[in-house]
Amino acid sequence: MPTSPAPTSPTPTSPTPTRPADHRAWLDLLTGDAVADVLGAALAADGATLESWSVRHVHARPGAEVTVAYDVVAGRDVGGRTVRGPEHLFATSARTSTFRRARGDHRDRADRADRADRDGGLGPGVVRLDDGRRSVHVWRHPHDPALPGLAAGSTPDRVAERLRAAGVRTVVVRAGARSRGMDRHALGGSWRAVLALGETIRLGVRVAGVLRRADADVVHTNSLRADVVGLLAARWCRVPAVWHVHDRIADDYLPTLAVRLLRALARRGPRAVVANSEATARTLPGVHDLTVVHPGYAPDQAVPAYDARVPPERPVVGLVGRLSPTKGQLELVRAARTVLDDRPDVRFRLVGGALFGAEAYADAVDAEIDRLGLRGAVDVVGFSDDPAGELDRLSVCVHASPVPEPFGQVVVEAMVRGVPVVATDAGGVPEIVRPAGEELGVLVPPGDPDALAAGLLAVLDDPGAADRRARAAYDDATRRFPARGTADAVTGVWERVAGRRRRRRT
């Protein structure tokens, strides 16, 4: 979200808005210009003025519960001179009793705010925006916030806007709250999965209505949940379905019951299946029309030439990806301790938010940073809407997944930015890093922090070899993984499947 100018004289008194009807209205309120007064009032408690502000993270929960983290620039008058610097403020529209669920550094402050609110006053540095039923509280965060949540720019409505602007006819069919909250770990027969089944069927009926009105030739689905919904809708409309599978359908990646169900459906349901890697394809035995199509990168994700990259002056190791047990942030934090013992000049960055209920894992990562004494050496950045910019800040990009990943898109994204890679030797990653036996990066066993640390030190201590690998990786990735090749291959599957349908109809 673009930076918004602050009012010239922020008022210390919180405004009183009309009560928003739902979480979207709260989101509009907490990201709109009216919030500047509240932010200004929060800073005024410490004698600071609000110079500018922008939204850093957004987490919108069902039931009108919205949390926002802000980047602000605060000015202070110190001895006749104005000092400006960044601060971080945190706001939520939830009732004060829900603050006790806030993460780590927020918890004590939130409890104090809750007690102060019950006593009829507000704690220091806390501002309330009260509509009579709900309150918005704002308080400082002592360091760069790693707020679990979603970027405002990633909502279905924003994606739909971009598609429509590109001339693509787009219809958003919204899922129910239960099915939206399902992740791949909840697919194994839990009570949540049972409750979500009814919503899935209703969603399939609604999607079928869209397909009939569109007179679709092919239904393409792009996630495990969409595979089931799309298959139901396609069968009802007698339209062929193409599954695009981005997950390994294996017991080490999914619940056993989900593996059996999805493999059975893949053999009998879709007319064709596209797998994102050979590793994914190997987990789909018995599928007759199976095509491997590696995901591609967009042209603006790559530097124009390898020599155009400007590496950072100070060594920075980073992992770009959502905070999740399958991404390996804990493994990297543990490896960081070993690396820093040998190379104290290295800094680490964890870029990505905690999605799909991974807040507990994010807390565990924060706790491990503190336990190992790494606060200040490891930056937990949170969500970034500029992954290419984050990759450019790195000397080494780490892929640390402790379980075999289906592909490893961030490895390709790092290669086309010219960044050296250390990655786990499992799943689809070797298809990227070791094509035909050529070593384009350093591969290490998954789930082994000591091996990961050794791989990082090998890159950091021999920059000449790292540069040679990164140059070869750039040349290989820009040749093998452009998005145009991915689009052409998937379009070929659609045309083949649609051609069969047309022949049957005639």
Image: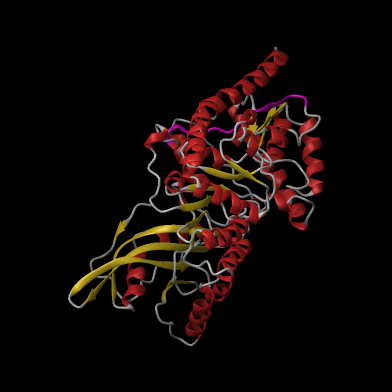
Q: Nearer the viewer, residue 424 or 198?
A: 424
Q: In the figure, is residue 421 to the left or right of 38?
A: right
* Residue for point 55% across, 58% down: 339
Q: Quadrant of residue 364?
A: bottom right
Please tell me whether the stretch drawn in magenta is mainly helix, strand or loop.
Answer: loop
* Residue for point 59% across, 48% down: 455
Q: Position of residue 267 (x, y in %)?
A: 79, 31
* Residue for point 76% across, 37% down: 283
Q: Residue furthest bottom?
A: 119
Q: Is residue 8 visible?
A: yes
- Report the span colored magenta: 288-300
Q: Position of residue 396 (x, y in %)?
A: 50, 47
**Does 298 appear in magenta?**
yes
Q: Quadrant of residue 498?
A: top right
Q: Nearer the viewer, residue 120 or 220?
A: 220
Q: Position of residue 66 (x, y in %)?
A: 51, 62
Q: In the figure, is residue 207 to the left or right of 348?
A: right
Q: How many numbered discs sit on the rendered protein?
A: 0
**Does 59 appear in magenta?**
no
Q: Decide: is 113 above or below 287.
A: below
Q: Decide: is 85 above or below 410.
A: below
Q: Is residue 212 visible?
A: no
Q: Nearer the viewer, residue 297 or 311?
A: 311
Q: Decide: is 339 above or below 429.
A: below
Q: Position of residue 456 (x, y in %)?
A: 55, 50
Q: Decide: is 472 above or below 182.
A: above
In which quadrant is the C terminus drawn?
Answer: top right
In this figure, which colouring scheme has been used for the structure? secondary structure
